[in-house]
Image (cartoon, rainbow, N blue to C red):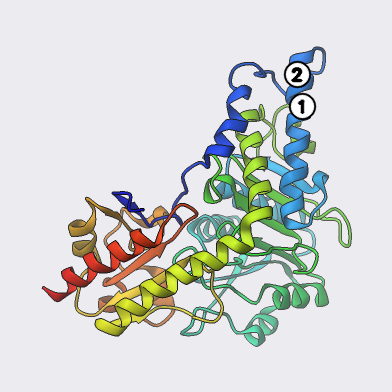
Amino acid sequence: MLHLPVYLDNNATTPVDPRVLETMLPFFTNYFGNAASHSHTFGWEAEAAVKYARELVAQLINAEPNEIIFTSGATESDNLALKGIFEMYASKGNHLITVTTEHKAVLDSCAHLEKLGAEITYLNVKKDGVIDLKELESAIKPETILIAIMYANNETGVIQPVKEIGAIAEKHGVLYFSDATQAVGKIAVDVIQDNIDLMSFSAHKIYGPKGVGALYIRRKNPRVRLTAQIDGGGHERGFRSGTLNVPGIVGFGKACELCKIEMKKEGDNLKILRDKLESALVNTQKVQINGSTNYRLPNVSNMSFSNRNSAELMAKLSKNIALSSGSACTSATLSPSFVLKAMGLNDEEALSSLRFGLGRFNTEEEIDYTIGQLTDLLAD
């Protein structure tokens, strides 16, 4: 069935799944207690709901429930991980390693840490958007305390060799933090098999509500410690003070539960639709796919349209098709994508690129419509 307008910006955010909303609603009205209120039934009910949601979130990534810290979203989780580790492990060293194509929440946090005395190594990526593992290992030195490399890129969907990165970090006694916001719920993520020590992710990328996310913090082999960045009350085992967003957390848990059950089938279906979109456009137009086509998320495509400005294309399509030219966090700027530039694209190629983020509720009819609209537009 065709639903207009067609929403193809699921990397920026996803609609709340009706099943998630249904689970959340009672916690705005009947079960509205503060999870930190331990003296009456309202607080007990809220606390129990948070406990259950924490278990569901942990199960999705093969973690223990007490390794999940709830935050307001992945940006806060990124800040807590980077700044908390830098402060906690200052006596060991001040060197961090990251990548030029990271999310701005990571890059801007690193820039902040540089002002505080941190030394940051920014690794480049190859043309396909993947890092060179030899360059990573050669960048490690005695003062290195953290490697921060995302799981999958938010603009291209390119998946980094996470398991190998984690193994290198473990070999050298360095902690590994990964922003997995785009990957969790889309592909199988296992913090144990992937050797991840800290990992951020968010509910609103997996059909849950906005305003709630999580930071996974490993508790053994090794036990990770970090310094809290928000003080007051000692909530979340002292890592993140503040009244818990119980309805949001409940929704987050339900969203994770649904992803665990439906992720594989959903990913297979989205890959079919994504590949159909790409094949139709690449075969009929001067179009190139940006980033690895072997190592990427099943729902994402980033394409450059030769000699066509992406802003103009989006403006002409915006009434009936929702797209973006890159990350939502940088969409207010007119400059070419720093991610695509880091992959070797020139300004013209980067400024002619569109990101297609398919999602759970997209239909084949919507993809066919998008192909038709873009084909007609590019033929002008």
Question: What residue is rendered at 65% in x and 36% in y?
Answer: 249
- Quarter of the image where one finds residue 186: bottom right
Residue 304 visible here: yes
Image vertical order of residue 185 relative to residue 247, above or below: below
Task: Find out whether the residues at labels 2 and 1 contact each other: C-beta distance under 8 Å.
Answer: yes
| 43 w.r.t. 3: above or below | above
- Quarter assignment of residue 366: bottom left
Residue on which the image places disc 1 = 47
Horizontal side, residue 258 vs residue 334: left or right: right
Q: Residues within 10 Å of mark 2 (few under 14, many from 20)?
A: some
Outermost right residue: 221
Q: Residue furthest left?
A: 380
| Occupied quadrant, residue 117 | bottom right
Residue flagged by tag 1: what amino acid is it? Glu
Q: Nearer the viewer, residue 147 or 332?
A: 332
User: Which residue type carries mark 2?
Assistant: Gly
Residue pushed farthest top?
Answer: 40
Percent position (x, y) of residue 23? 62, 32
Circle on res. 43: 2
Q: Secondary structure at mark 1?
A: helix
- Residue 73: x %, y % from top left: 57, 44
